[in-house]
Structure formats: C-alpha cells, structure tokens
Image (spheres, rainbow, N blue to C red):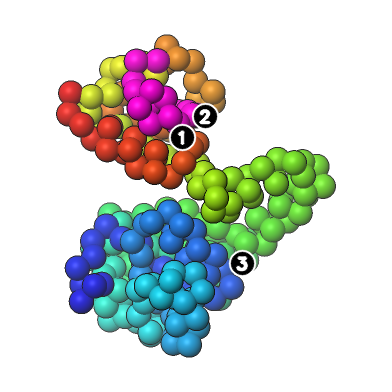
Amino acid sequence: KQIDDLSDHVVLAGGGSTGMHAVEELWASKLPFVVIDTNRRRMEHLSEELCNGRMLYVVGDATDDSVLLAAGVRRASAIVAALTEDKDNLFVTLSARSLNPSARIVAKVIAADAVPKMMRAGANATVSPNMIGGRRMASEIMRPTVVRFIDQMLHDKSEDLRIEEISIPLGSSFVSKTLRDAPIRAEANLLVVALRVDGKFIYNPEPSTSLDVGSVLVVIGPEQNVGKLRNLVKEAS
C-alpha cells in the first residue's frame, strides 16, 4: 500500500554491491524510492542496516514488467538500473522506457561498448563503476585532500552537508532576479558553486548573474537549507 501511494519516486533495480550505495545516498537525501531485488534476505538486511527498517522494496526480477509495475515504475520520476549484467540493465532500461516515457533513467554499465546500446534503449545517462573506481584511485594520489573533503561533506552525518541542484520553475519569484537579489544566502544560507544555463555551466557565477526559467542552481550547504531553498523557488512572483 505504501508503494501504491508513491509518485515521483525512484525505482532502483538491484540492491547488490552497487545498488546498496545508491540506497544509502537516496535515504540520506530523503528521496522516496523502491528497491527491486530477487534476494529477500538482502533487502531485509539493507533495510535494517541503512534505513532503520523502513526501506520499501519488491522481491522479484526487475527484468519482469509486472515487477517493475509493482514498484510503481509508471509513476516514478527516475529509474536506476544497477543489476550485475549489462544485458539485464539493458532489458530493464528498455522496459522502463516503454512503461514510463518521461522518467529519467540511469543505467550501470560494465563493458565500454554497452554505453551506446543503453543510450539507444532509452537511458538518459550511464555510470561505469570501473571508470569511477579508476578515477577515484588516481585522485587519491593526485588530490587526497580534495577527496577527503568531498567524502566528509557527503558522508559526515554530523555535518549533513550536500551538493544539490535546484531548477527555477515557471512563475518563480526568482525569475529575472540576479543571484545578489535572490534570497539564496540570506534566507537559505547556501553557497552557489555553479549555474547551468542552456546546457552550459557557469562556475562561481558573478552576483550580477541573472536567473531565468530553467536555470539550474548548483548549491552546497546543509540538507535542511536545501529544502528551504526548494520551497522558496516555488513561491510565485
């Protein structure tokens, strides 16, 4: 019943070695999500270990349309395909895209040649754990302090800091205001590290930069302040 009542949630296919880290991040970000996995004991363990026993999940094969539907895939805002094999993630991507044409789909890939196939199947983005792992290892050599900073910021529960993105919707009071005039620092106490406009990033934007419908703020700060800013941008002008 709780799953049936959900909408605009994330469906995570696969709660294994990759999916478990996605669970941790989704739970920390307070985003509603449902996990699909064939292993009930694994789901029970993840729920108790990471989500205080409150994780919503469906026990079944995510490549089966009926299981995706049971997880509310038609009402989901995003789908993550994090199964072990590329072929299974490809199948989930195809099925999810046919069931929900508007959802954002992110697929895990192992083989490099699987990336274009995933994109043709309907994925909006792909993630390679091997590539990310290799880059992380190189970063540990070249910029260890930066790595520690990001890790501590994202995972230190006492600090509760996040890097988040917030889009400016139509009718928002932020439209046509500059960063200086928008109450981002004054009321939400967040730092704007970048602004995405027309698909391009403006890093460390000037206070005189104007905001428009569809502009995306990339901010850093406490999670509760991020929620406050989300509410502020929804207020009508």
**Residue found 27% across the figure and 78% down from its top:** 70
**Residue found 47% across the figure and 66% down from its top:** 23
Residue that badge 3 annotates? 110
Observer-nearest of 50 and 10: 50
Q: Residue furthest top?
A: 208
Residue numbers of the magenta segment: 180-196
Q: CA distance from mark 3 to mark 1?
A: 29 Å
The amino acid type, in three-letter code, at marker 3 is: Ile
Q: Is residue 62 above or below residue 200?
A: below
Q: Earlier in the sequence, mark 3 or mark 1?
A: 3
Q: CA distance from mark 2 to mark 1?
A: 6 Å
Observer-nearest of 11 and 56: 56
**Residue found 28% across the figure and 81% down from its top:** 66
Q: Is residue 23 above or below residue 39?
A: above
Observer-nearest of 225 and 72: 225
Q: Is residue 235 above or below residue 144?
A: above
Image spot of residue 156 (x, y percent):
58, 51
The amino acid type, in three-letter code, at marker 1 is: Val
Image spot of residue 138 (x, y percent):
78, 49
Q: Which mark is residue 206?
A: none
Residue that badge 1 annotates? 218
Quadrant location, the C terminus = top left
Q: Secondary structure at mark 1?
A: strand
Tags 3 and 1 touching, CB below 8 Å: no
Image spot of residue 17 (x, y percent):
59, 73
Q: Secondary structure at mark 3?
A: loop
Q: Earlier in the sequence, mark 3 or mark 2?
A: 3
**Residue found 52% across the figure and 29% down from its top:** 193
Q: Bin the neighbour count of mark 2 within 10 Å (Cα to Cα): few under 14, some 14-19, many 20 and up.
A: some
Tags 2 and 1 touching, CB below 8 Å: yes
Q: Which mark is residue 193?
A: 2
